Image (cartoon, grey):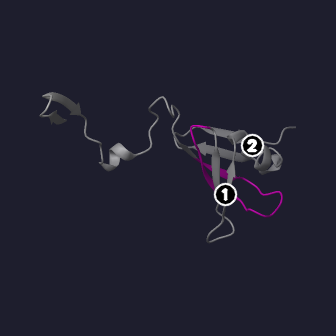
């Protein structure tokens, strides 16, 4: 803790130091401004009905506390491409649901998985 003293008024103000250790700066699910924090995920396609993106892990992405979602296509190598969506559901509606034969698995950083399979 840092103490600041105003000598004119003899007022004391205690300030907590700003943490700078790497562990302190990692994204966390804290504060009322962003209660969900940043969640990262991968997209694995078990098949590729269009033949464009390929099979396996084809996307890495993150969803911000606001729901905004950024994805990084891992193809074409070596750079791929980036896309930004207003919501995670927008991303799913465009790149996952229209391709049920891909049997896509989304895996979050905490291990939670959602599998989008063809029905029927």
Closer to the camera, 16 or 94?
A: 16
Q: Which residue is mark 2?
A: 90
At mark 2, the secondary structure is helix
Q: Position of residue 45 (x, y in %)?
A: 71, 53
Instruction: Give percent across and percent down for residue 104.
Output: 72, 47
For image coordinates 30% across by 48% down, the residue present is: 20
Between 1 and 89, the one nearer to me in the picture: 1
Q: Which mark is residue 37?
A: none
Q: Is residue 1 above or below residue 49?
A: above
| Residue numbers of the magenta segment | 41-66
Q: CA distance from mark 1 to mark 2?
A: 22 Å
- Residue 11 lies, with reference to residue 69, above or below; the image says above
Q: Is residue 120 left or right of residue 85?
A: right
Q: Residue at x 47, y 35 (%)?
A: 29
Q: Mark 1, mark 2: which one is toward the viewer?
A: 2
Q: Quadrant of the C terminus?
A: top right
To which residue does mark 1 refer? 56
Asked if the residue under mark 2 is in contact with the one under mark 1, i.e. CB atoms within 8 Å, the reply is no
Left or right side of 92 for 19 = left
Q: Quadrant of the N terminus?
A: top left
Q: Earlier in the sequence, mark 1 or mark 2?
A: 1
Q: Residue furthest right?
A: 120
Q: Residue furthest bottom?
A: 78
- Image quadrant where residue 93 sits: top right
Task: Answer few, some or many: residues within 10 Å of disc 2's Cα (few below 14, many 20 plus, some between 14 and 19).
Answer: some
Q: Is residue 30 above or below residue 46?
A: above
On the image, the x and y values in percent for residue 38 come to: 53, 42
In the rendered structure, does residue 97 fall within the stretch colored magenta? no
Q: Secondary structure at mark 1?
A: strand
Tell which of 45 and 7 is nearer to you. 7
The percent coordinates of residue 63 (x first, y second) are 60, 43
Horizontal side, residue 34 vs residue 74: left or right: left
């Amino acid at each position: 803790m840092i103490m600041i003293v105003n000598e004119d008024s003899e007022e004391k103000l205690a300030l907590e130091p700003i943490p700078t250790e790497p562990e302190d700066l990692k994204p966390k699910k804290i504060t009322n401004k962003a209660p969900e924090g940043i969640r990262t995920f991968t997209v694995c396609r078990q098949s590729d009905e269009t033949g464009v993106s390929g099979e396996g892990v084809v996307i890495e992405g993150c969803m911000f506390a606001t729901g905004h979602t950024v994805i990084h296509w891992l193809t074409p190598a070596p750079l791929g491409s980036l896309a930004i969506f207003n919501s995670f559901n927008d991303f799913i509606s465009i790149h996952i649901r229209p391709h049920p034969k891909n049997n896509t698995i989304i895996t979050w950083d905490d291990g939670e998985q959602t599998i989008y399979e063809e029905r029927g």
